[in-house]
Amino acid sequence: MKRFKRIGEKIKMHPIMAFLIMTAFVIVLSGILDVFDASVTYNKVNLKTGGYESTLVTVESLLNLSGIKYIFSNTVSNFVSFTPLSMLLIVLIGISIMDRSGFLDTIFFLLTKNMPKTAVTFIFTLICIMTSITGDLCFVVMIPLEALLFKYGKRNPKVGIISAFAALSLGYGMNILISSTDSTMITSTEQAARIISTLYSINSSCFIFIMIPATLIGAALITYVTERIIAPKLGKYEDEEEIIQDKEKLTRREVKGLLFAGIGALIYLIIFIYNIIPNAPLGGNLLDYSQNRYIDKLFGYDSFFNSGFVFVITFLFFLCGLLYGIGTKTVKNHRDICDYLSHSLDGIGKVIVLLFCASTFISLLKYTNIGTLITAYFANIIFNSSFTNIPLLILVLFVSIISAILLPSFVSRWNILSGSIVPVMMSSGFSAEFAQLVFTVGSSLIYPLTPVMAYFVIYISFLEKYDKEGIGVARSIRYMIPYCLIMLGMWFILLLLWYVIGIPLGLSSGSVL
């Protein structure tokens, strides 16, 4: 094993080349599966009628005429519409002015000056877990911010990137607050449950009792892996081009700058928060009132808040950086503003190419339906399974993990699997909520390990930025393995504990019927 590890270290394939090879493999595999007429028919719950409907999944080949046409006609549009690209570029503009004006250096110093390193890591890990409620935006905001936090703290920024990505990815499976993804999945869970119990309904707080300990213990375990395994392995970080100066206390200008930024941010946030309060007089304008649950009103596809959230955060960053710069006089004129806005975009060409290759790989894999085919195959395995109790729990956990490798979307896979998992688990004595929880947990455990997950490319891009020798896809995945293994152990113990003792998962919920 050590010999293979040394060989892997020597090869160290560039991420761009790795994505190109994976793309070529998908193209060839789709052609082979098409030759053998690979297809799966499974039972899916119709959300309108509430009954089963037979659904056929076939592989779309990329080696025939229509596949080749798709590659050449959609590659550019897929890249332009690749969400991580637009999010990253816009958010980096806001982070740039906060960084160059000195705001981040000062605020990180203020927040961490009297705090042990482990405590800082734990707090920011917990913040990352909680911000996973915002969905995809958390990756493009928290990863660069935590890299700068570690950098200004004279620690290796790669450790911050790895820690942030682990917490954000695994946070999809553990969060005290329900996310829009959870809410969408609850709708499918209810429909699938009504095949067994026609009046079954699920409370939006149905997971809170198990999520409180899971979130706190998970944050502690991620901190432990970061401080005891990842940080010692990566060692110190030395940037020859930039030396971080020691700071013992804030200057008068820095205090003035923080005061300006704090007042501006407070006014901005008051206006913003008032506009996400439902039915407030002249407020609540950012919500989608066609939805029932508040989280869907906030993060629903048609809500103004959801569509404009990236700009809302970016403008907040811009405001803090600008006002701080005015207060400290690090921003003297409009030229400084323009220069600072583009600071984080300097030398980003390699990242753009990497994003292009990743978007091509992900879009072509999605077009082939290979991930959907495998998920449908597993749905049939569960539907026809004779397992009960703990063996069934382990089977569902295993299926949730494996199916997420090529189809990481929680909602897409749950639409396929819920019609099998929920009725089978309910027939074995589990509640529908418990079935969804096991699926969510299993999916989150593999989330940091699959390059098919769109925001994996953000993680590897920032590792590349702070590593002069380069980080390969294999090594970036290897950094995540200790986190996933320790979280697998935590969740397996918690799930068994809640099931065996019969502790309610949350309000109006239980681990068994």
Image (tube, rainbow, N blue to C red):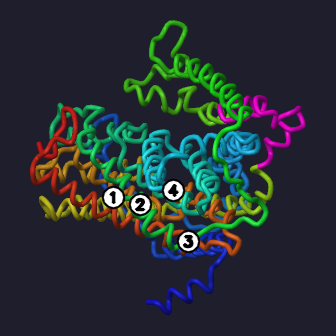
What residue does disc 1 label?
A: 442
Give the residue at x 22% y 32%.
Answer: 201
Amino acid, disc 4: Phe
Quarter of the image with the C terminus is top left
Residue 16, given in percent of the width and then of the height, sits at 68, 69
Callout 1: SS: helix
Q: Residue furthest top?
A: 281
Residue 322 belongs to the span the image colors magenta: yes
Q: Which mark is residue 404?
A: 2
Contact flag, marks 2 and 1 (Cβ < 8 Å): yes
Amino acid, disc 1: Gly
Q: Residue furthest bottom?
A: 3
Q: Main secondary structure of the magenta part?
A: helix
Gap between marks 4 and 1, in whole Å?
Answer: 17 Å
Q: Which mark is residue 234?
A: 3
Q: Is residue 17 left or right of residue 222?
A: right
Residue 314, given in percent of the width and then of the height, sits at 66, 36
Gap between marks 3 and 2, in whole Å?
Answer: 29 Å
Pair 4/1: label in front:
4
Callout 2: SS: loop
Whichever of labels 3 and 2 marks the residue nearer the N terminus, that label is 3
Give the residue at x 67% y 35%.
Answer: 317
Pair 3/1: label in front:
3
Gap between marks 4 and 2, in whole Å?
Answer: 17 Å
Q: Is residue 181 above or below residue 61?
A: above
What residue does disc 4 label?
A: 165
Residue range in magenta is 316-343
